[in-house]
Amino acid sequence: MPDDFNISRPLLLKGGTVVNHDASFKSNVLIQNGIIQAIGENLSYPDGTEIIDVSNKLLLPGGIDLDCHIGVASSNDPVADTYLSAGKAALLGGTTTIVNTVNACPGESLLNSYEQFISAAHKNLACDYGVCFRLAGFSPEINNELVALVQDKGVVLFSVRLGSKTLPIVDDNQCINEEEFCYFLKSCRQLGALPILEAATSVSLSQKLTSDIQISYPDIGPELNLITSPEETEANIVLQGSLFSQYAGFCCPLLISRIHSEAALNCFIEQRRLCRGLLFGQTTVPAIAVPLSLMSSNGYSDDVLTRSKEWAVAASYINHPPVRPATHLSQRLLTHLVSGDLVSVGSGHRAITTSVRAAFGLKNAIHIPRGIAALGYRMVVLWYFGVETGYFDPSTFVKVTSTNPARLMNIYPQKGRIEVGSDADIVIWSNSYKQEALKNIFPVGVPNVFSNTVTYQSGPEIVILRGHIVVHNNEFLNNSSCCGKLLICQPFSHYVYARVNSVEKSINSEFTVFQREPYAGNVASSVADISKDCSKEGYYFRKEHYDNIPKVALPPGQRKIHTSVKTAQPPGGSSNAFWSNE
């Protein structure tokens, strides 16, 4: 970050309404040295303080996005945005902190991958940032690196995808098998990290379905993305994850991310109840807003998303897992955010240009890069479809976009709350929002999947990051281009781990060891003894047991045919070699 970014003028936000996840009230807010110094009606402030009139506006904690992927473009990861452009988009949309998912390649050191990301992001990210690793496997060596990442680097989030690894893995489909997943959960439990499991179809199953379909339909297009991800398979992954996290000899909290289907949602809700709330759920804003946006603009149609007749439009919706064209699912996701079953909404951001999608997958749909650009739209779109339609109030909005993500990362109340002593990450939310601020928020060539016919009237007018104004009047300030700070998180989040020991004891107490009289009978000492005790009654069989069955199909030693039984034989009768005893 620039050397002068740590030095800022005091700010006084006057006349606004402070909104936290548990309360909202009118108050002034004094910011000094990047920290919230005071909250109240009549505040004294030092000379030189910049006073900003925020009457009739809301003061929200800066947004925190746990699910996004940015990086340096490569053949294996052809992302369109840079660290600078992604950070700028986040701030323009009201998100002050992101957690970037770093893909760990097989055989590559996690610590080396971490250092490469930090080196590339340092002085290039405009917003604060943390790290989440997506693991491609699990071994004792990887476990040792997890220990170092958690204890020395402050990384507490690790994501995985499940698969059997029976087929060669292609593209970005790295996964771990069930045995590795069990050891992975146990390691996270011991370290106090939060494991994340994507509610997506098993990698190996998806590839098998793809192979079978392409044999019959070699020219199939982007609709392949939806066909090869049945809802039931996503629900099965949720079920597997919850069972392993609770009944593998220990209890481990688990975050199920990217809940994009009704079957996965139903399974998650049921398992969350059975897991006593140690199962946390997260969805993405495309899963909520894309179907509702299309409904608002076009009404219901079968030719939407990956079924669009235009290849470029269909390809722009390819995602992992796929976004489904079901508005009732979007409404249910909003409802469960209110009830607390789902605790967070991420962007699921991965920006891919249309030309890159065509270069990779125009001739073979399986190679179309997957991802939807949503980083800058997350807050604005969710406010429109969540708050303005009456599904939840501003406090619930704050809870799912800022407070709960901060709790999951264990950085609350440093972030995720407007409180004395917290970081001064504040979004001044206005009802006179200029939607033009979002027009150029994505890199050139990246499609906007959020319908342009929807008019967003509320959004971030001013964004403050650690006491500095980085967005003003919906415009990004150039002097704040490199102000991002790496977050060092502590393990064992109270929000995640507070009840784990109690739940573990409760589960163990449900198992009862019955007291029985000792067994006084004989115990066979060898296989020979067991064979000696076997009954001879099966030597001959009744006719119905072997009629029309060749003698060789009978068990060895039982191939003698009772003379009183008529059996099927070849013409001329059966014959045996002279040395045969049967």
Image: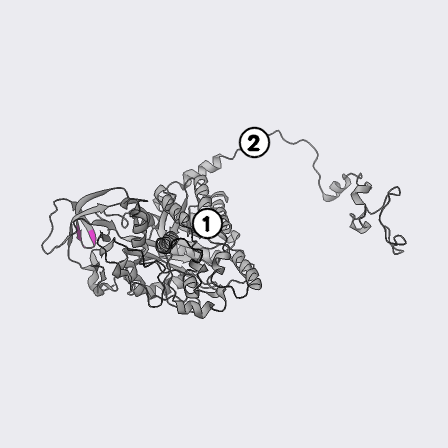
The reply to whether residue 489 is visible in this rendering is yes
Mark 1 and mark 2: Cα distance apart in space: 30 Å
User: What residue is pinned by disc 1?
Assistant: 185
Q: Name the amino acid type tagged 1.
A: Leu
Position of residue 510 measured from the top left corner of the image (x, y, whole percent): 49, 34
| Span shown in magenta | 30-35
Which type of secondary structure does the marked residue at label 2 adopt? loop
Question: Mark 1 vs mark 2: which is more N-terminal?
Answer: 1
Query: Is 496 placed above or below 520 here?
Result: below
How packed mark 1 is, by other alpha carbons closer than 10 Å (few <14, some 14-19, many 20 or more), is many
Q: Is residue 539 left or right of residue 263?
A: right
Q: Name the amino acid type tagged 2.
A: Phe
Taking the view exactly as shown, the residue that stands out farthest to the top is 517
Whether residue 25 is in magenta: the answer is no
Position of residue 213 measured from the top left corner of the image (x, y, whole percent): 55, 60
Residue 195 image label:
none
Q: Is residue 419 left or right of residue 157?
A: left
**Which of the colour schemes (rainbow, by chain, secondary structure, one colour) is used?**
one colour
The front one of 441 and 123 is: 441
Q: Specify the principal SS of the magenta part.
A: strand
Position of residue 447 measured from the top left corner of the image (x, y, whole percent): 36, 64
How packed mark 2 is, by other alpha carbons closer than 10 Å (few <14, some 14-19, many 20 or more), is few
Position of residue 52 measured from the top left corner of the image (x, y, whole percent): 15, 54
Query: Is 205 placed above or below 521 here?
Result: below
Q: Residue at x 45, y 37 (%)?
A: 505
The front one of 104 and 66 is: 66
User: What residue is pinned by disc 2?
Assistant: 514
Q: Residue at x 80, y 51 (%)?
A: 552
The front one of 1 and 11 is: 11
Which type of secondary structure does the marked residue at label 1 adopt? helix
